[in-house]
Image: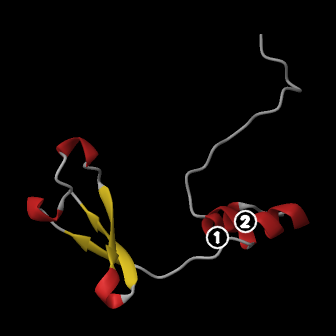
Amino acid sequence: MVDAKAMITRVIAAHSDQALAMLSDPSEQERAILGGIRYAANLVYLHRDIRLMPKRRRAWASWEFSALAARGSCGSTTWP
């Protein structure tokens, strides 16, 4: 039997701004924590070119980070 007073916990996989928007009446602490996370623009390329993947296949993941030193920026590629 489940105790009716037991706390129910939910885990939501969302960006912090999206999670904050889901709360009907966020507390000051929730606003401070979820609203305090900043984002940076990045480039993402969807590709199927294995030449862009790490040499070690065991290191492959759906998202690969790539530092573009010549451009002074970074980005990621998405492997389908």
Q: Which is more toward the observer, 77 or 18?
A: 77
Q: Out of 77 and 57, give the one closest to the viewer.
A: 57
Q: Residues within 10 Å of mark 2 (few under 14, many from 20)?
A: some
Asked whether disc 2 touches disc 1, contact meaning CB atoms under 8 Å apart, the reply is yes
Label 1 secondary element: helix
Question: Could you tell me the amino acid type at mark 2?
Answer: Leu
Q: Kindly identify which numbered label has been placed on residue 34.
A: 2
> What amino acid is labelled 1 in the image?
Asp
Q: Quadrant of the C terminus?
A: bottom left
| Residue found at x 27% / y 46% | 59
Instruction: Tell me the element at label 2.
Output: helix
Indicate left or right for 66 with 50 as reference. Answer: right
Left or right of residue 25: residue 53:
left
Q: What is the x, y in percent for residue 10?
A: 67, 41
| Residue 43 spot, x, y in % from top left | 35, 79
Residue drawn at x 31%, y 60% as measured from the top left: 64
**Where residue 17 is drawn, which disc sits there?**
1
Q: Tell me: residue 66, above or below residue 1.
A: below
Residue occupying the far top of the picture: 1
Which of the two labelled residues, at mark 2 and mark 1, occupies the earlier sequence position? Answer: 1
Q: CA distance from mark 2 to mark 1?
A: 6 Å
